[in-house]
Image: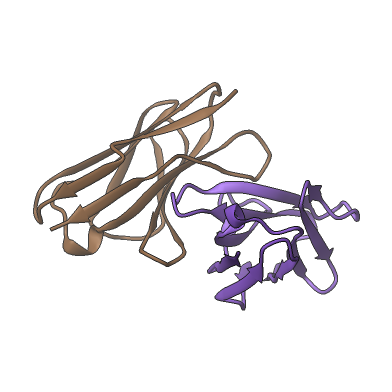
Amino acid sequence: SQTIHQWPATLVQPVGSPLSLECTVEGTSNPNLYWYRQAAGRGLQLLFYSVGIGQISSEVPQNLSASRPQDRQFILSSKKLLLSDSGFYLCAYRQGKSYEQYFGPGTRLTVT
Amino acid sequence: AQTVTQSQPEMSVQEAETVTLSCTYDTSESDYYLFWYKQPPSRQMILVIRQEAYKQQNATENRFSVNFQKAAKSFSLKISDSQLGDAAMYFCAYGGGATNKLIFGTGTLLAVQP
């Protein structure tokens, strides 16, 4: 069966510091991968998605970037964090032709 | 462009009662999928139920069922025999066509009163 992991679970970083969040999927190959951000009590904002290794689509121009160095690994990065980058970050995957996405446990990021 | 609308920001239900969450969508596609996701206080998104547009039969998963009205572009979620563990944010989502993305509604926060 497929599983999706995210780490770290929580992170507190100062403004201006770099960021690296990692997402990995097990039990599947060539999934579509997604990064979402969610502010407290708000909806989901799609940040990036990837349909294959090295293929990244950006939905919202901002301080973040994404990379997919391996088939089942998706990384969200920033060179310099802003206060507005605080939030809950969710990674998700989609397999094959079905449209449903399955989500990881999320990372709670606080920028101080 | 496809849109998903959840017009109820918050709902409340008594334990053991039934509650219905509303969702409407707009699309020009004929073949698509609709989903309800649950986000409990842990904030992990959990897929509750899915509906394929070409199927006339409403999907059911245990105490969760949908009322899918394709012509009206309505997709409501009914939770029967509500339990305290059903308290969560519920998101309606659309997927279809050539897009690789899901379109989410803004969510409905469901409280379950003991």
Residue A65: x, y in percent? 28, 47
Residue farthest along the bottom direction in this orientation: B7
Q: Depth check: give the residue in front, A102 or A69.
A: A102
> Which chain corresponds to the colour purple?
B
Q: Quadrant of residue A99?
A: top right
Residue farthest along the right direction in this orientation: B56
Q: Using residue A10 as the reference point, say whether residue A13 is left or right of it.
A: left
Q: Quadrant of residue A34?
A: top left
Q: Using residue B93 as the reference point, say whether residue A103 is left or right of it.
A: left
Q: Depth check: give the residue in front, B94 or B18.
A: B18
Q: Using residue A50 as the reference point, say whether residue B91 is left or right of it.
A: right
Quadrant including the C terminus of chain B: bottom right
Q: Depth check: give the residue in front, B73 or A32.
A: B73
Residue A77 is at least partly visible in this image: no
| Residue at screen point 74% across, 65% down | B17
| Residue at screen point 61% across, 69% down | B3
Q: Using residue A77 as the reference point, say whether residue B1 is left or right of it.
A: right
Asked if residue A96 is positioned above or below residue A70 in the image, the reply reads below
| Residue at screen point 58% across, 66% down | B110
Asked if residue A90 is positioned above or below residue B82 in the image, the reply reads above
> Which chain corresponds to the colour brown?
A
Asked if residue A22 is positioned above or below residue B44 in the image, the reply reads above
Quadrant including the N terminus of chain B: bottom right
Residue B113: x, y in percent? 59, 67
Q: Quadrant of residue A50?
A: top left
Scheme by which the image is coloured = by chain
Residue A24: x, y in percent? 41, 29
| Residue at screen point 86% across, 55% down | B58
Residue A101 is at least partly visible in this image: yes
Residue A44: x, y in percent? 46, 60
